[in-house]
Amino acid sequence: MYCSTFGYNGEVTVNGRPRDMKAFKSNVAFITQDTSLQPYLTVKEAMHFAANLKIGTQLKHCSKRERINKILEAIGMYENRNTRTGQLSGGQKKRLAIAMELVNNPPVLILDEPTSGLDSSTSKQCISLLKKLASEGRTVICTIHQPSALTFKLFDHLYAIADGNCIYSGGIDNLLVFLDDLSIPCPEFFNPADYCKPSLDEKLLSISF
């Protein structure tokens, strides 16, 4: 697929092959930071709307209902299926937004700051849900600013960016070793996510000069 956007020309490829927009859209789900739900719909009604729009007539009504119930049970929202979305907590709204994207079972989930506006405990529940989805074979990618230590430990792979440049890419367990090698060891009982960026910025600045 050759495209021109905002003065840039080029070919968009996925795994080295030209991107097929129709197949790409059905395989990738993007969940924005701000959860936009219809407040007067119940959880179950919102899920049925999502299923009808994303799946269409590919599945019968009974099959859609069965899939919706399984998803709601998996994310811990089945007991709230008759609750209006406007009455849900922030964490429940976030889980429902994720659930609505799961109805057509996309292999890739991309989330923009899924823990934004959530407290530490609810953030941990949200990331735990995403980790569970990843363990089922999906690829889950999310941008997160200043995660708590509990949330940080749940990540499988970290890609840290500062000023548009990658300052670390790898497993969470290797981050402390990486900092030690740069002679900026993270103090004990300190959140590596809070310590990593300013310490690396200062170290890289001193190296550049």
Image: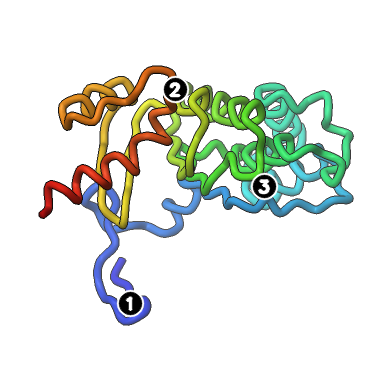
- Amino acid on which the number 2 mark rests in the picture: Lys
Query: Which mark identifies residue 57?
Result: 3
**Residue 33, horizontal then vertical, whole percent:** 59, 51
**Residue 6, horizontal then vertical, whole percent:** 37, 79
Q: Which residue is mark 1?
A: 4
Query: Which mark identifies residue 153?
Result: 2
Q: Is residue 133 above or below residue 52?
A: above
Q: Residues within 10 Å of mark 1 (few under 14, many from 20)?
A: few
Residue 137 visible: no
Q: Is residue 84 left or right of residue 2?
A: right
Question: Marks 1 and 3: which is nearer the front?
Answer: 1
The CA span between labels 1 and 3 is 34 Å
Quarter of the view holding residue 4: bottom left
- Amino acid on which the number 1 mark rests in the picture: Ser
Residue at 26% from the left image edge and 31% from the top image edge: 170
- For marks 2 and 1, the one nearer the N-term is 1
- Depth check: give the residue in front, 97 or 190: 190
Residue at 58% from the left image edge and 52% from the top image edge: 32
Quarter of the view holding residue 176: top left
